[in-house]
Image (cartoon, helix red, strand yellow):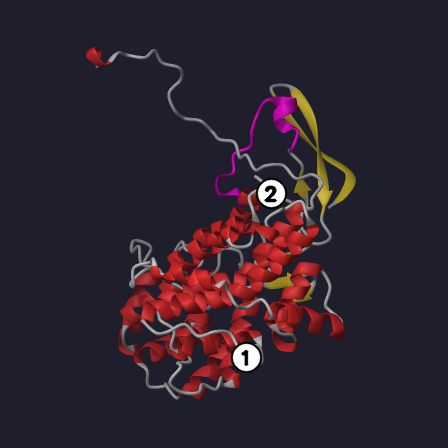
Amino acid sequence: MTDTARTAKLTIDGKTLDLPIHSPSVGPDVLDIRKLYAQAGVFTYDPGFTSTASCDSTITYIDGDMGELLYRGYSIDDLADKSNFVEVCYLLLNGELPTKDELEEFTERVTRHTMVHEQMLHFFRGFRRDAHPMAIICGVMGAMSSFYHDSTDITDPVQREIASIRMIAKIPTITAMAFKYSVGQPFMYPLNDLDYASNFLQMCFAVPAEPYVVNPILSKAMDRIFTLHADHEQNASTSTVRLAGSSGANPFACIAAGIACLWGPAHGGANEACLSMLREIGTVDRIPEFVARAKDKSDPFRLMGFGHRVYKNFDPRATVMKESADEVLSLMGIKNNPTLQVAKELERIALEDEYFIEKKLYPNVDFYSGIILDAMGFPTSMFTPIFALSRTVGWIAQWREMITDPGLKIGRPRQLYQGHTRRDFVGLDKR
């Protein structure tokens, strides 16, 4: 964060305060109100923190108006096209792209940590057979702190590094095990000769009875899903991880908190909600009915998978994801699938209809990722767990940045209290 000599003047009850203005490397200026309560005795009111910078960070930058997403300064388009998820993990964690030797060493470390402790299998058997996979991975991630005591000391940089590698390496295994448990199939162990995305697919879809060969188109699409969802600035789940981490909680507990937050349908469940909507529409001939409802201000129905809270123009991730969606649908030969026919026609309308264009309701990454995951054979209950798998590295990078911040303080938002003032207690016999 770059300090400038500029200040903003705020006058309250005749008292004028000079509030510092900070200029970032890119993006809007930030008004520093840290001393506002001490100097003026007032708080700011910002529900949802939509106008509040909770921290300074060097990891991810979003320009919602321009439709731009940068990881450590690199555009998401370039990374999705020219890089891979493991390399992006290294970038997010360390701030720079790795050399060839650094990437090989990092990949080797991740690969060698993909297995989970054998006793953790008992955790899975403790869940009901119809437990939601998100409930399982949230619980198992939190339970990792009871298995790996040698990497929970947040003051030790070596332990922080070990914990980071372990979580990045084991979250695909945990997620795949949650999937296998939900469908009643035996767990498949990771294979060290496969890349990160291919390994996840084989752990999900292979069975002991026959060999399984990962299709490179599906592996590439999965790697892109991981990359596009790896981090997204200070969203709800990332802020949850930072808030939990500010208390000094161990890293496994912090990431479990992020997983729990991501589970919400307004956050990580958006692609699941999108596919449910497509199935509700059912057939192409019913699309006009639902489009009309979306345009009707008096109708609470809204199209899921279109527009974005942050991106006011288009979602840069959607452009890349659309390419993968076309490749996967072509490969799987399921063009006659009614749900996917609805998706393609709805996409066409959204890109051509004046209402959608004027409102900038373009298909977002959730629209395409849901289509791809469905085509691959994943049930909707697995969409958010795969999102959590992808976002784990971003949460870890944000947590590590926060932990090493010399200005770290425990999170403690304030409130606008609207309740009763002090009242006298009334005994039970007089109520």
| Position in image of residue 261 (x %, y %) | 45, 51
Q: Residue furthest right?
A: 5
Badge number at residue 2: none
- Which quadrant of the structure image shows residue 344? bottom left
Which residue occupies the foreground of this view, 426 or 12? Answer: 426
| Position in image of residue 100 (x %, y %) | 74, 75
Observer able to see residue 319: no
Mark 1–mark 2 Cα distance, whole angstroms, equals 35 Å
Stretch of the chain drawn in magenta: 34-50
Position of residue 165 relative to residue 370, above or below, is above
Please tell me whether mark 1 sits on a helix, a strand or a loop: helix
Q: Mark 1 or mark 2, which has the lower sequence index?
A: 2
The C terminus: image quadrant: top left
**Residue flagged by tag 2: what amino acid is it?**
Ser
**Residue flagged by tag 1: what amino acid is it?**
Lys
| Position in image of residue 272 (x %, y %) | 38, 65
Residue 49 colored magenta? yes
Observer able to see residue 114: yes
The residue beneath circle 1 is 220
Position of residue 133 relative to residue 249, above or below, is below
- Which quadrant of the structure image shows residue 429? top left
The residue beneath circle 2 is 54
Q: Is residue 32 left or right of residue 101?
A: left
Which residue occupies the foreground of this view, 427 or 292? Answer: 427
Look at 35% across and 61% down and name the residue there: 125
Look at 56% across and 60% down and name the residue there: 167
